Each structure stands twice: as C-alpha cells, then as structure tokens.
Amino acid sequence: MALVAGIDTSTQSCKVVVRDALTGVEVRAGRATHPDGTQIHPDHWWQAYQSAVEQVGGLDDVEALAVGGQQHGMVVLDEAGEVIRPAMLWNDTSSAESAEDLIMERGDGDRERGAQFWADTCGSVLVASLTITKLRWLRDHEPHNAAKVAAVCLPHDWLSWRVAGHGPISQGGDGDLSALFTDRSDASGTGYWSPFTNDYVMDALEQALGSRPLLPRVIGPDQIGAHTSWGALIGPGAGDNAAAALGLGLVPGDVSVSLGTSGVVSAINANPMADPTGLVSGFADATGAYLPLACTLNASRIINTATTLLGRSYDEVAELALSAAAGADGLTLVPYFAGERTPNKPHATASLIGMTIDNCTQANFARAFVEGLLCCQADGLDAMVARGVDPQRIFLIGGGAKSPATRQIAPSVFGHAVVVPPDGEYVAVGAARQAAWVLSGRPNPPVWPLEGSVTFTGEPEPRIRQQYAAVRELTYPSH
C-alpha cells in the first residue's frame, strides 16, 4: 500500500493527514496550532509542521506529499534565505490604503478604470488581502526592509521549500532561493500573476515593491516540485481553497461554501473570470481549471462571538437559534467584526440592528448571529451567480458548518439544498490527493469516494435576505 501525505498550513494550525494513495482511506493524522495574529513569523509554521509530523509518527513511509496553505500571506526573504520580517497574513488589513493607491495609479486617478485594469490583469480587483498590496505597504512603511527583499513567496511555498530541505543559512540551510516553487492556484491570489496568460506580471510587482525580486517557479498541478531527504516526491501544493475543492472532488456545477476563519464561496469554472466590481476574485484551481470565489473576512468566528456574548456553549447557541423564528423577530446582525473584504469595507465594524424591548431575547440574538453569518455568504453566492455561475450542488464545509443551526437554516437563506460532507480536513485531504496524483503519473487525479454526506433542505425564507439587505450598509468605521 503506497502512502501519501497532505499538509495544511492554515491560519490557525498545521494539519497532516496520511492516506492510502489508491483509495484515499485515512491511515493517521496530526495537528499543531499556530499563534494568533495577523502577522506571524514563518518559523512558527515550521515548528508546527514538525510537531504535527511527530504526532503521526513521522513521514518516512510516505512516497509523496504536498502542502496546501492559507493564501496571500506575504513572506519576504533576503539573499541568505532569512525571513526579513513576520509574514503579513491574508487577514491583515493594514494594506487597505495601499490597495487603493495601486488601483488609482493604474487608472490615472479614475478608480473604475483602475479596477478594470487589475481585473483584466490578475483576475481580481485589489483588496488588502492580496500579496501585492502588502508589498506596497512594505515599500511605503518599511523601506529598509523592502530594500532587503531578494525573494517573495507565500506560506505554502515557504513550507514546501523547508520540507524539501532548504532554509536560511543562519539555521544551517543552503539559502537556495532558486528552489522555491508554487502552483497556479496560490500564484493567482498574489495580484502579480495572470490567470489569462499563466505568467507573472512583473511590472505590477515592480509597481508595488519598487524592484523585481525572485519569485517561485510555477509548476503544473501534477508535476514534481522537489524531493524530501528520504526520497518522497513533493507536489506543487495549492492555495487552501483550491486544495479544499480538490479534496471534495468538486466538478463544474458544484459550489463550496466554506465557513472557516474566513468565509469562501467558490466554484469550478472552465474559463478564467474577471469581475471589475471586485466582488468575485478570478483565481485558478488545483487541476488546471479556474476557481472564481467570493471571500469574506468573517465566518465561523461570528458564532464564536455569539457564544461569548450569550455565555452559552456552541451547541446551546445552535439550539437557541433553532428555537427562534426566521428573521429573529426583526433583529439583524451585520457581521463585519473584522472589517470586510466582500464587500470591500476593511475598516467597517459589526452592527446589531432592529432591537426592541420584545425581541431582545437570547433565542433571537442567537438566530440573528447565524442568519448574519449566512446572509454574508449568500451575498457572495449572489455575486458568483451574477458572473455566470449556475449552482447545481452547494457544499457546506468548515468549522462553522458543524453547527446544527447553520446546517438547518442555510437552505432557507441560500434558496438551495445544501450538502454537508463528513467532517474532515479537506485542505489537507486535497493536498494528499494531489500527492497521489503526482505519484501516479496519470493524467487525472485519483477518484477518492466522498461517503457519508447529508443533504439539508428547507423552504426559502426571502424575508431573511431582504431584512439583511435593508441594513447591511449601516456600519461604522473602526477608527
């Protein structure tokens, strides 16, 4: 039995799963946490990876592996392979003004024209999440660090590089920056790679940083990026959303709604997409196709906040929410606790609107939080449909999908049945499936059955969306 490993270096933790390459059956798994924050030194990812590998008893019996990881995070290296400063993660909104600067510059002061340029160039209108905006922030706010940059990579690129035996010279590594590699899906979230030409846009990189540092080579979805010290193949890896789509086995017509730290609505598409409104990002997927998606900064943590506010457990909040009527008797949450990316409101705050003496009950509060979470994602789904996506099946995954309230209320908000697959680490599973693909040498990834899914249905409740739409602009800046 050939074994493969999938690694997910996510915002919150590193997960490692070992699976049978042919059947996909899990053999063992491990997990180690990452520190909280929006700026994290990559050494923490390496330490968490080592800890997770130790939990699974090592990977010496694994014949291939691949790394999936959080998109967009800016990792900057000097000529010796040293990390210059902590990585700025996707959820760091410091570069919001930098994004606007880059848009306005390309539009010669006309934002609409600038937005169209970036949509046509990299598939996305720039927001603070994208790597290119963080590089502009670095140039403007830390010019001494910007001057040291010899290479720029992403979290999954950096960890793949370390797993392949490379590293900073100060830690006994070779500092070989030319060994960095990545894949289309993660490159497509940088703002300086084009899904239309499948190549880097170097003048965009120079516009942001003021120089043209080395970038990881972009390899195909079934190509070998490197080898480990024990001879295992290392696949190209993928951005987290693309890896999750591969783990779920999504095909055209499938839409995934992922409720993790962020909320992501994504779909498999045969052609690249450019949305000048900025609501949909035109990313690539992990198979050679495309993965248009709408991303929110707020998702499962909305429910976590409800548990804190109400002093109730996760299950108790779900029970309360299900005991309340649809619409929470007029109580509506606009859940922009961390600012927002879709719509682009990086400095917005959350608002709880429509309170009366009668509707201020714990049940209505719980219901409003769940409906706010789902309405936020439904806005992303609407944006995808407006760009031509035709949902046939909607998959609900991520930590937020574990809530019985989320599962049961989602069909009423989305207006579609939702499929909830078995609880699993689908980013890591997708990375493992990619590793099996690379190992097989075949033209398509292996078919791994997805068993145990449950479909939830419900009558559409249009008033929930209407109530939310009436107040979602009533937010206040955080400063």
Image (tube, grey):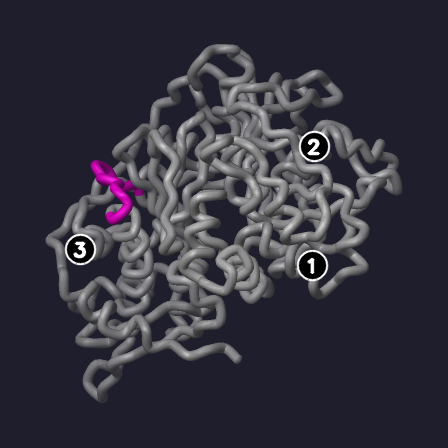
Identify the residue shown where x is 52% and y is 27%. 432
Residue picked out by circle 1: 138
Q: Which mark is residue 180?
A: 2
Mark 2 / mark 1, whichever is N-terminal? 1
Most distant residue in the left direction: 459
Q: Relative to the observer, which residue lies in front, 367 or 78?
A: 78
The tag on residue 90 is: none
The local crowd at label 1, few if under 14, some if 14 to 19, many if 20 or more residues have their Cα within 10 Å, is many
Distance from label 3 to label 1 (Cα)? 44 Å
The secondary structure that most of the magenta stretch takes on is loop
Any magenta on residue 392? Answer: yes
Q: What stretch is highlighted in magenta?
A: 386-395
Numbered disc in front, either 2 or 1: 1
Query: The residue tagged with tag 2: helix, strand or loop?
Result: loop
Q: Which of marks 3 and 1 is in front?
A: 1
* Residue visible at 67% across and 55% down in the picture: 40
Q: Specify whether residue 442 is in view.
A: yes
Q: Is residue 300 in sight in this rendering?
A: no
Q: How crowded is mark 3: few (under 14 residues within 10 Å), some or many (20 or more)?
A: many
Nearer-the-camera pick, 353 or 109: 109
Q: Residue at x 24, y 68 (%)?
A: 469
